[in-house]
Image (cartoon, helix red, strand yellow):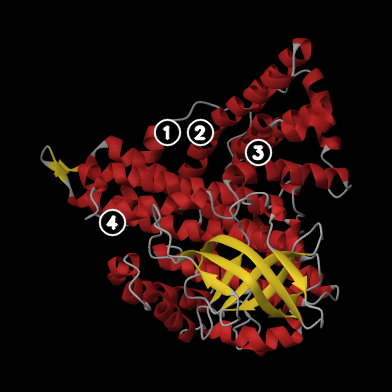
Amino acid sequence: MSIKGGEFLIKETEAKNIFIPEEWDEEQLMIAQTCNDFLEQEVFPNLERIDSMEEGLMPSLLDKAGELGMLSVSIPEEYGGMAKDFVTGMLVTEVTGAGHSFAVAFSAHSGIGTLPILYYGNKAQKDKYIPKLATAEWKASYCLTEPSSGSDANSGKTKATLTEDGKHYLINGQKMWITNGGFADVYTVFAKIGDDENLSAFIVERGYEGISFGAEEKKMGIKGSSTVQVFFENCKVPVENLLSEPGKGFKIALNILNIGRIKLAGACLGGCKKGIDISVNYANERSQFGRSISKYGAIRHKIAEQAIQTFVLESALYRCTRDMGNAIKALEADGMDHASALLKGVEQFAAEAAILKVLGSEVTDYVMDEGVQIYGGMGYSAEAPMDRAYRDARINRIFEGTNEINRMLIVDMLLKKAMKGELDLMGPAMKVADELMSIPDFSEPGDALFEKEKKYVQNFKKSVLMVAGSAAQKLMMTLSKEQEILMNVADMAIWTYAAESVLLRVEKLATLKGEENVQEQIAMVQTYIYDVADKINKAGKDALNSFAEGDELRMQLMGIKRFTKVQAFNPKMARQMIASIMIDANKYCY
């Protein structure tokens, strides 16, 4: 039974219905190995050359990736692609995500650069551009952000004016932070036609007159990725290069961002795994006080926590990716064409995509920060690998909408679904309110695998519904302005989704491999839930104290305490077990 977007808060998902990475088939593993081999042979040995922006190097790497088919995994066969499903496409994103600046150029080309034309282009546009983009004969870029419009993309000032003969649009304006901008051949450019309220989208080629480029930006990280300003001065674009219809550009941008957000989480996952490998290697090699630092509890705690958060991210990522894939297949079965089904299927899970964008970028920051700490003084040296990893990771909390914007979007999208009748949040929220008035259930869960943890996750959901429902009822039309409260509720939802995802993954894994063979993964579930119970409690209290008062506040604070209560648990022992496996293997091995 497929679950719909947002329903994770109100419905139970069965472990058998999710996809877990332990189920990759042989072909998918071969594709992943091809991508991994490419990084090992072409990218990792050349990181210094890439970061110094050696002329022509990044385009040549994209050419080589194109020859191997890495850019065309998700492109239909009629355009020279492999036509693989959404989950396989995510696997490619994950593996290449370890590639530092190359990963940024790769994702910008194959994602936001190519997808607007693939999904919104007419047949002539797709026939002309997609085969060349699939092989990297032409490189792609995406021009949305402007000096005065970042998060508020639809406020862009770039204008498109139809010429008197009706054959061209003249585009005037300026775009900034344009990835791949310095070498791309094809740009998807967003501009407003005349006095239109909403953006339109145009396919602009590098050779068109009136387009020019600023110097390469000097950045904190991802130094090897091309980032320039792009200027349009009466840039002459044929009318047939309008993408979709006038005024549809903002919708195109939003839908491409939904895909971009979950893909960013995939790239972050690949970076995390590589970061942990480097951390474990160094911890095993470095000796202090006569023994390897990997033997010390403080270091083991860091290594284990890097692994737990990465494993949780992976669980949530592929759970959501499969849910999106199922929605796409269901829409196709109902007669929708593939491109429309993909956009609609992804859009259904836009809230989960935002959850994963925040989770992925913040887990990556944690992993890289602790990697620097494990390296100690060497972590701060540009001679050691953590310097680049740490700086490159930081952009992910800003890319694809800042994490603050994404947190607010999570709650906004869920509440809008509820108001449209697509998601029944108020019914379950009222049941939770009734439960607060009743005598608490003091029965203890049994000893079956994850019986306790399932009850904890159910209670986490109740805490989200209670706080969100109460805030919506109390604040009503002003809730959208209460950013601190929205971010509290979003955090509660993120941790709840992540906790349930890792629980479902390991429950399924235990049925496949046997409970005795997944003890470290069970320890990860237990440690994560034990940790986020306190975090959900704190976020819930902060939100309630910000808008409720009197008897209502007292009752809801009792509720949040009840819904985040977990039994005593030994996290030190669990982390020791998780870390020791990786230290013995000298890598991330989950």
| Secondary structure at numbered mark 1 | helix
Which quarter of the figure is the C terminus placed in? bottom left
Dot 1 corresponds to which residue?
571
Please indicate whether residue 300 sits to the left or right of residue 440 in the image. left
| Secondary structure at numbered mark 3 | helix
Kind of residue at disc 4? Pro
CA separation, marks 1 and 2?
A: 9 Å
Please indicate whether residue 56 sits to the left or right of residue 187 in the image. left
Would residue 74 be visible to someone looking at this image? yes
Q: Residue 531 shows which numbered tag?
A: 2
Q: Nearer the viewer, residue 560 or 389?
A: 389
- Above or below 464: residue 504: below
Number of the front mark, 2 or 3? 3
Kind of residue at disc 3? Ala
Which quarter of the figure is the N terminus placed in? bottom right
Kind of residue at disc 2? Asp
The reply to whether dot 1 and dot 3 touch (C-beta < 8 Å) is no
User: Looking at the image, is mark 2 or mark 3 earlier in the sequence?
Assistant: 3
Dot 3 corresponds to which residue?
490
Residue 150: x and y, percent?
Answer: 61, 51
User: Looking at the image, is mark 1 or mark 3 earlier in the sequence?
Assistant: 3
Kind of residue at disc 1? Pro
CA separation, marks 3 and 4?
A: 34 Å
Farthest-out residue, top: 550
